[in-house]
Image (cartoon, helix red, strand yellow):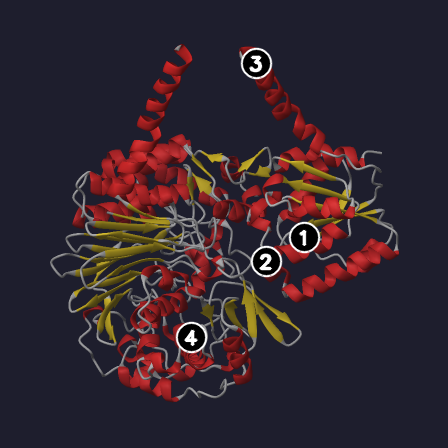
Amino acid sequence: MKQRAAILSILALFIITFLPGFVLSQPKGKFEQPVLITSAGQSADVTIAGMLFKRANIQAKAIALAKTTDLDGVKTLVVVAGFSSKGLGAAGISREQELTRVKSLLAAAQEKKLKVVTLHIGGKARRGNQSDDFNKMAAEASSYLLVVKQGDEDQFFSKIAAEKKIPIDLVDKIADAVRPVGNAFAK
Amino acid sequence: MISKRWFRVRMVLFLIVFIIPSFVLAQQYSLGAKGKEAVGTKAMVATAHPLATQAGIEMFQKGGNAIDAAVAAAFAIGVVEPDGSGFGGGGGMLVRLKNGQSVYINYYGQASSKVHEAGFVYGKDNQTARAILIPGTVAGLTTALRQYGTLPLSVVLAPAIRYAEKGFPIDETLSKIILDNTNLLLNHPATASVYLHDGFPRTEGDTIRQPELASTMKAVARLGQVGFYEGPVAKSIVDEVIRSGGMMALDDLSKFRPTITDPLKGSYRGYTVFTAPPPHSGVTVLEALNILENANLQRLGYYATSAESFHLLAETMRRAYADRTSFLADPRFEKVPVRGLISREYAKSRFDDISMTAVIPADYRKTTSGMPSQYDRHDEGNPAIEGSGSKKNDPTVDTLKKSTRTDSPETSHVIGQAMYLEPVGGHTTQISVMDGDGNVVSLTQTLGTFFGSGVTAAGVLLNNGMSNFASTARVNTVQPNKQPRSSIAPSVLLKNGKPFMVVGSPGAARIPATVTTLIVNAVDYGLDAEKTDSAPRFLCQKSDQYLSLESRFSTEAQEGMKKKGHQLQLFGEFDLFFGGAQIILVDSSGTLHGCADPRRGGTAVGY
């Protein structure tokens, strides 16, 4: 009886400790530089994404309102998904205009055969009706998803990843995204 | 045997530690979850954060009254909802005492005596040290406590100090606001050290500690307001403001005093309305209510499902906002035609100007202000009006109509021919409190926009209230020692002389529309506290091209509004943009029903 309890305890400890490591599925292909970071929804998260890349020593240009012409010479497009009414206001555009911009940018990236990576770092704050159109659009067009766990509590991104067979990394905190960014883009 | 005994012991311990206190608490208090109604007969506190609500309740447990509870909650909310208000901001507090006396404590900040040396430029400097007003919160709350409270300052400040020292977990609302304002926070190392970790935003579940703020609070607890407005804390603030490019003098702080006046008084469908006098926006709420009183809203249908009543509300607010833009300012510096603005005759003329079939004028931005000065002679016995204006500046309606400023501190953008107002969120905070004796407090306080100027001194995050002065108009211009116009409108409604509703909201320019809508929901449609607070909200103002509304308005209402000529801009179902109202309604039996806005993370607690 005691032996079984001990085995179960060790097993549980093992699962708790190591399972998150298995869930992290590093992107199969490395992503090439130069990198262009843009927003899908105009949240301030695009600035934070820039900081993540800087911390990971990956050179990347961040243009929140990137146009298709900004893709020239770019090898990987990083889309930071999440809606912000404040950001849209600051940019002076409507939500519909932003949806159109992102859609055409993703189409252009596909046409140019660029790889797309989606970063969702805003957690629950960047989920819900206003954000999820952007989240879905970006995630489905991506070759790799990097998501802060709080934004995937309902497995919104995990389900897209499973359905579209897209590698996904889930991290606890924004700062934890530095390592997978470094791994994904390392030369 | 041993393990069974241990199991029993652990169960008993678990019951003692968790279950029994919960049961006792549930018996004692009615806990309104987010957006849920709380019920009580002896006390009610509604704030935007459970810990601030708890601070208020603690004062009742210590034998305090509604003023003690409101002041404790107001100090605490500045710690646990630090983006919205705090020691470095200001506000207004409407107090209705059990003896029937009503007062308004205006502790909003005012411009420095050296404001012109700072060179504040509207727009460019809106979130910089140049936008900092002399903070009024500490003076206002300590004055309220001294005049109308019963507990010592050290007791009332204790919960806030505790939260600042020990920390509190970031909730979903604060997490989003930190994310949205990362750029501002990054600019100020002292501020970043609180809200960022390792250069990245702290998020939901992380703990925020503010030891330096706790230290400043302890100085105030020990010395009273002198602990803030004089001595090392004051010097720290002045030094940091100047170092950051703003302007403030030690004298500005030491001479700062809140004002205690009569509140503005009006009525709506038989209810007495007390609200915030100029330069705060109670006058706009009263004007809107007076216009609406000319129609039977019930007969027109519920505004969230009927375009008829929604259109009337929208067109009413558009006119009230236009008047606010043209006439509202600090009455110590400019004449405000308050009597005219809240006269029924003037309201009738504004009502007659509304077409029930179409938006006229079709372009919101062409909405003209009325001529309230012509109705200024109709005195309705309002004590707050007396002495509310000096003759330093007596602008005529004609000159005011040339005004081109926008209606809020928010930035407008031109897209082609269309203007798009930058929606910067529902900053500021509301606290509503009532006790069983009939003492009532409605309090709205703010830092300006979220996180104010971003500048922190002595642990105190400083406001950016200068952005509430006008950019180009001839009213509400920047002057030394002057208070800018503010949207805040804490209000109390009485029915047959007894408190019926305690109401107020944050939300910048949305505040007058939100407070008016809340009153309409309770009075015209007879909704309970929860439904009143949850009901869909909108904004219709002169400076916008669009009617902004929550997406829960029915399709019929939305389509009907489009047919009348409104251009709609949809927001989320429950959008922070439209404020975070805390309300208390008193039913005919005297039972208190409180509700915290589901758009924020607050709670109402009563017992």
Which residue is label 1 attached to? A135
Element on which disc 2 rests: helix
Secondary structure state at the residue bearing disc 1: helix
Q: Decide if residue B255 is in sight here.
A: no
User: How far is disc 1 from disc 3 in space, using C-alphas?
Assistant: 44 Å
Q: Position of residue B406 (x, y in %)?
A: 49, 70
| Residue annotated with mark 3 | A6
| Residue B549 percent location from the top left of the image | 50, 68
Name the amino acid type tagged 1. Answer: Asn
Are marks 1 and 2 in one subunit?
Answer: yes
Alpha carbon of mark 2 to alpha carbon of mark 3: how far? 46 Å
Q: Decide: is B366 above or below B607.
A: below
Q: Is residue B228 above or below residue B274?
A: above
Mark in front: 2 vs 3: 3
Q: Are marks 1 and 2 in contact (CB under 8 Å)?
A: no
Comes first in the chain, label 2 or label 3: 3
Q: Are marks 4 and 1 on the same chain?
A: no
Would residue A87 be seen by someone viewing this image from the given angle? yes
Residues at marks 2 and 4, CA–CA distance in whole angstroms? 23 Å
